[in-house]
Image: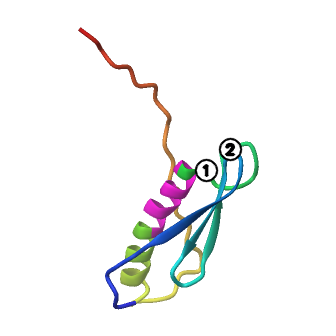
Amino acid sequence: MTDDHRSVELARLGSGRYKATNARGGVMVLGSGDDPDFTPVEALLAAIAGCSAIDVDLITGKRAQPVAFTVRSEATRSATTTATT
């Protein structure tokens, strides 16, 4: 893909459910976590893992194709507090 511009359109499917569609017609359903759909945070983790995996795969794939290749991306939710004075 030579175009540097990326876009995603988000359409509401129902309460807490959305369909993201890219310019090539790819679809990802996002939800609130009450169903099997990806939450927005899980989609972000997948994007981070995907960027890293593509870079590593392009470099290592020049030597040989992998027998297996797995990337795990995880995060711990932390509560944030705001101080008021």
Q: Which residue is mark 1?
A: 39
Q: Residue furthest right?
A: 35
Q: Which residue is mark 2?
A: 33
Q: Which mark is residue 81?
A: none
Query: 70 and 15: which one is in front?
Result: 15
Q: Is residue 7 left or right of residue 29?
A: left
How far apart in space, not on screen, are marks 1 and 2 (Cα)?
Answer: 6 Å
* Quarter assignment of residue 34: top right
Query: 75 and 3: which one is in front?
Result: 3
Query: What colour scheme has been applied to the protein in the rendered image?
Result: rainbow
Placement of the C terminus among the 4 image quadrants = top left
Q: Is residue 27 left or right of residue 2?
A: right
For badge 1, the amino acid type reads Thr
Q: Is residue 20 magenta?
A: no
Q: Residue sitting at 37 percent across and 75 percent down?
A: 55
For badge 2, the amino acid type reads Gly
SS label for mark 1: loop
Rate crowding at label 1 as few (under 14), some (14 to 19) or many (20 or more) other CA atoms within 10 Å. Answer: some
User: What residue span does the magenta drawing correspond to?
Assistant: 41-50
What x and y, as percent, mark residue 29?
66, 62
